[in-house]
Structure formats: C-alpha cells, structure tokens
Amino acid sequence: MEVPADDIAVARILQYLAYICTALMTFWIYDYVCSLQDEWTFLIQSRWTKVKCLYITARYTPFFLIAADICLTLTPDESPKACQIFINIYSCFAVISLTCSECFFVLRTYALWSNKVILVVMLSTLFAVIVSFIGIWFTAIPKSQYFTSSAIPGIPGITGGYRTSSSVELYLPFVLLFVFQLGLVSLTLIRAIQDWRSTSYPLHAALVKHNISYYACGLFFSALNVLVPVIFPDSAYHSFLEDFEVFILAILATRMHLHLWHIDHQRCTFGNLNCISMQDMLPVHRVG
C-alpha cells in the first residue's frame, strides 16, 4: 500500500521535532552540569530570600518543561487531544519560567538605577505583559491545527505530535515580550552610557559590566519568535524557537544572578564591609 505524500511529510516533521527535543534536552543538561559546582555553592551558602526562591523556580522549572516536551514528541500513537493537553502543560511551565527570568532582569535594572519608581513601573508592566501573554497564548492553542502520529498508522516508529497556525495570536505574545525587553534594554543602555561618561571605563567595559549582552540575547530571541511565524506561517518548528527562548532566558537570568552573587561573596570573604548584593537590590554601580 502506497503511503500518501502528506503522511510522509508529517512523519518527517515529527522525526525532526524528536531530534530537536533531544538536542534541547542535551543542551539544558550540559549547561546545568557545567554550572553545577557554582550553583550548589550558591544554594548552600547563600541565605534564604525571595530572590533565592525566584532563582530556584527559574532554574528548575525548565526541567518540567523538558518532561512535558518529551511526552509531546515521544508518545507513540498520540491523539490530537493528548497533543493539546501536553502543549497546555508545557505552555504553563514555559510561562512560569519566562516570568521568573524576566523578574531577574527587572531586579537587575532596578539595581542599576536604584529607583523604586522604576521597579514599580517595570513590575506592573511585566504583570500586564504576562497576563496578556497567557490570555493570547492559551487562546491560540485550541485554534491550532494538530498533526499526530495516530493519524499516520501506515508509517511505523513515528511518535509525538505538533501544532501549526497562521493566526496572529501565535506570535503576538512575543511582540509584547519584545516591547517589554526593549524597554529594559533601553534603560540598561542609558545607565551604562551614563556610567561610562562619569568614569574612565571604556564603553565596552561599561556595557559588559551592566550585562547588556544578557538583555540583547533575550531581545534577539523574542524578535525571532515574532519574525519566523510571520515569514513562515504554518511552520511546525515555531515551538522549537519558543522552547529555546525559554531555556536561554532561564540560563541568562540565573547565570547573571550567580555571577553577581559570587562577586558579592568574594568581596564579603575578603572582609569588605560595604559588599553589595543583588539580593538586597542595591545599586550595582557601587560594585567594584
């Protein structure tokens, strides 16, 4: 019996998505192992604060996201209903991870400016963005078209499922996220330039000191999640970019916090009474 060309195309996409899922899982575990020593030093030696709880949530939520992604892409004979359930589950973990990661960038921006008005405005804006993000994202899920392994029984060994959509609701949440991140990048860049003008630091050193590359990476991946669905509507691979941005933001936010904590910890170890910690949300420009 000849297998229809459409079924072969679906099977090929499902195979590629399984490979991508495996690659993302490997990437995340590799990053975790590489930073394991520094991370456990932080977890054991740092005091318990709200920021530490935020760190743990941001760092370990992607493990649940990976588990949901594995179920989505590796479940044999997956039905469209099961596919939608797995997408809802992994979307919940993705939103939690994104929220925690962006909170770190908001706190970092506040630490740069030491202005409570900025903190209140940015947290309020983040809350509005996340609420809108959730509403739009979960509205788009039921409207998507689902392709699963149960629809192609003629091709053995194929697992999982995926969704496609040409609706604006697919990328609109990332438009909101992009605008929010652009605001954070602008505030950070302004502060970096102000410090550069008031000190003898080279501009590059000022930008590195203010972690501008961390902000720029998040902005770049949000732009990708907007442009790719626009340029390639009904693409099956947009979920890969969504997952990758969640992982990258979690890595950037937690590594940024680890870096600042270790700087603070070393200063305290050498007896500096004026050591400054992001956990206390004090101005970072005082940090040597």
Image (cartoon, rainbow, N blue to C red):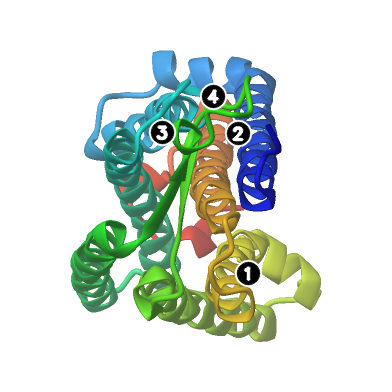
Q: Could you say where residue 87 lies in the image, as x and y percent from the top left?
A: 35, 43
Quadrant containing the N terminus in the rendered view = top right
> How dense is the environment of label 1, judged by Cα within 10 Å: few (below 14), some, or many (20 and up)?
some
Q: Could you say where residue 187 lies in the image, as x and y percent from the top left?
A: 47, 80
Residue at 51 percent of width and 52 percent of height:
239
Of pointers 4 and 1, the one earlier in the residue sequence: 1
Residue at 56 percent of width and 80 percent of height:
230
Give the SS element for disc 2: helix
Which of label 3 and label 2 is nearer to you? Answer: 2
Residue type for callout 4: Thr
Residue type for callout 3: Leu
Question: Is the Cβ of the residue at disc 1 closer than 8 Å to that at disc 3?
Answer: no
Q: Which mark is residue 21?
A: 2
Separation of disc 4 and disc 1 at Cα? Answer: 37 Å
Q: Nearer the viewer, residue 18 or 240?
A: 18
Residue type for callout 1: Phe
Separation of disc 1 and disc 3 at Cα? Answer: 22 Å
Residue type for callout 2: Cys
Give above or below for 238 relative to 71: below
Question: Is the Cβ of the residue at disc 3 closer than 8 Å to that at disc 2?
Answer: no
Q: Nearer the viewer, residue 147 or 211?
A: 147
Residue at 26 percent of width and 25 percent of height:
48
Question: Is the Cβ of the residue at disc 4 closer than 8 Å to that at disc 3?
Answer: no
Query: In the figure, is residue 232 to the left or right of 69?
Result: right
Which of label 4 and label 3 is nearer to you? Answer: 3
Q: Which mark is residue 269?
A: 4
- Residue pointed to by mark 1: 220
> Which residue is the extreme one toward the front?
1
